[in-house]
Amino acid sequence: MRFVGIDPASKTGFVALDENRAVIREKELTGLGTEDPKRMSTLIDEIMEHVHPGDIICIEGFPFATKKAIFAGGLHWGNRNVLYKRGLRYFEVAPNTVKKFVKVTGWVGEVGSKTSLTGPQKKRAVMKAGL
């Protein structure tokens, strides 16, 4: 049995863990090219190449505060459609739930001089906290 996490974005995060929480596969997926629909279509295919029957799949929920809303919506629905067609169940996880679970607030530093983490910094903090 594997536990799979998917964070759909133009650089999609993918992780698969075994029953003991050991990382089996950890990868950033991007698809091919820079133009859609090729990029989105190949990214969805690439994500699905890593998903196996029997996986317990968690997929991050839809982002609501994004400048790439059309791409994000298409990618999120595309993944869900393919999972559905393959008969694979998934659990949708609100975007901030994982951060809260591993106690990443998005801020670093001491009280009075805290700074906000950027997107990539926040992702690294979540990965580090989850280990």
Image (cartoon, rainbow, N blue to C red):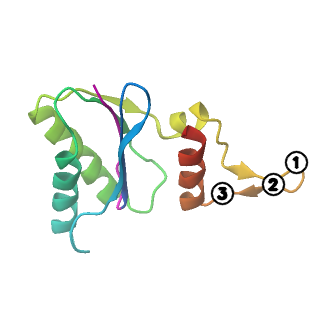
Mark 3 near mark 2, Cβ–Cβ under 8 Å? no
From the image, which quarter does the C terminus lie in?
top right
Residue annotated with mark 2: 114
Query: Magenta residues, as a range?
Result: 1-10
Residue under the point 20% across and 26% down: 54
Residue annotated with mark 1: 111
Residue annotated with mark 3: 117
Q: Amino acid at mark 1?
A: Val
Q: Badge 2 local density, few (<14 within 10 Å), some, or many (20+)?
A: few
Q: Secondary structure at mark 3?
A: loop
Q: Secondary structure at mark 2?
A: loop
Residue 125: image location, x then y, percent:
60, 50
Q: Is residue 13 magenta?
A: no
Nearest the viewer among 104 and 128 is 128
CA gap, disc 3 to disc 2? 10 Å
Q: Could you tell me if residue 109 is visible in this image?
A: yes
Q: Is residue 7 magenta?
A: yes
Residue 65: image location, x then y, percent:
49, 52
CA gap, disc 1 to disc 2? 6 Å
Nearest the viewer among 96 and 54 is 54
Q: Amino acid at mark 3?
A: Leu
